[in-house]
Image (cartoon, rainbow, N blue to C red):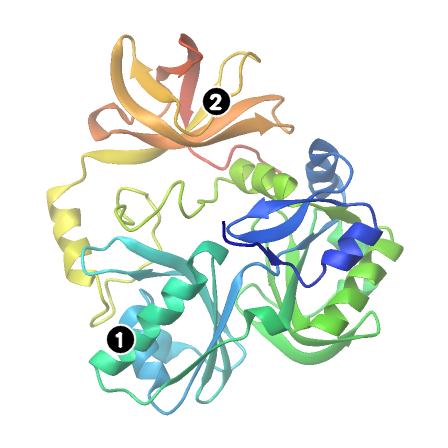
Amino acid sequence: MTSLIPTPLKEVHLYLGAQMGEFAGWEVASVYSNSIEESEAVRKDVGAFDVSHMGRIMIEGKDAQNLLDLIITKNVKKLDIGRIIIPAAILNDKAGFIDDVSLFRIKEESYLLVCNAINREKVKKWIEEKSKEFKLNVMVKDITLETTMIAVQGRSIGRIEELNLDIDKESFLQNIKLFDAEVKIISRSGWTGEEGYEIITDVENGRKLWKKLVEIKIKPCGIIARDILRLEAGFLLYGNEINENTNPVMARYWIFSLKKENFIGKKEIERILNEGVEEQRIGLVMKEKGPIPRHGNEIYSINKKIGYITSGGYSPTLNKGIAMGYVKSTHALLGRTVYVEIRNKLYEAKIVEPPFFHK
């Protein structure tokens, strides 16, 4: 059995009482106190997440822009220094997802690609192979293990004076001091559906920063709470909603630009848009508080199987089960009732449009 990669913050997590678990080949903080409490803290106040398991890959050189513009589904040539493309995708020739990614332009010929943990080595290999295939002068370096990445998310993040930074959602700051820690990059997004910042720095400063965040009463949260929050926000998870056999059209994940002259997968996307798809991603809310839907449960229309669940769980915000999955396009009708099979019984659910909560 392959050994897990420990998060660089493992010692800090253990010292502060976190339970460790496994995610995408990494040993991560699974839960600090209670995953429901942690997710509710983000919806009502502020929480901190160690997301150091996410891949961080530097792409540099005189041909870096040309290569990235070819493999990224959005227009890299329009990306200025200090700006981010988020989210975007790297697709294969059949328009299946190699990964969904964020791209930071660090300097004139220097970019940082943030990808999913499970795809870190695959993405690096894909970039290297394409650079050789198209004879482009590019240097690729995986800096994941020598850096940390911390996300601070929450509805009341404005109460934290040090985080009242002038950053819009498609830009980032470099080399600043935050809570007495040296920060390499700080960006602003909100993958929980709330306001938030992502902070990348070296391991020593990452540990210092995590301790400081906990010290000022920002609730430390684990990977379980993160999954609850991303599901409530309707965000897709690689390996569940998307993979190399799913395309952005069936996933209804509109992270590509057909105005671009070319990118790998564009012709196939155009063909799919013309011909349509057999199944589509939907959101589901269970009508009763009963059993919780889970990955792999089947979806029925009366007594006919029409699809399957890719992610499911309990929503503290709605106090009932929610899910995402795929159904036949002929049955993907907002507002209609379908049935989820859980432990050999059918339970009513309603097809809805994520996100599953509103501020």
Q: Name the residue at 72% across, 60% down.
A: 9
Indicate which disc residue 130 carries.
1
Residue depth check, mark 1 versus mark 2: number of the one nearer the observer: 1
Residue 90 position within the rendered picture, expressed as x and y whole percent measured from the top left: 33, 62
Q: Looking at the rendered structure, which numbered label has been put on residue 261?
A: none
Horizontal side of 234 relative to 28 (left or right) equals left
For disc 2, the marked residue is 293
Q: Is residue 59 above or below residue 117?
A: below
Does residue 193 show up? Answer: no
- In front of the other: 357 or 89: 89
**Residues at marks 1 and 2, CA–CA distance in whole angstroms:** 40 Å
Relative side of 233 to 208, left or right: left
Dot 1 amino acid type: Lys
Q: Give neighbour class at mark 1: few <14, some 14-19, many 20+ (Cα, 10 Å).
A: some
Q: Is residue 203 visible?
A: yes
- Examine the rendered structure and indicate whether residue 216 appears above or below residue 187: above
Residue at 33% x, 76% y is 128
Classify 10 Å Cα crowding around label 2: few (below 14), some (14-19), many (20 and above).
Answer: many
Between 67 and 294, which is closer to the camera in this rendering?
Answer: 294
Q: Secondary structure at mark 2?
A: loop
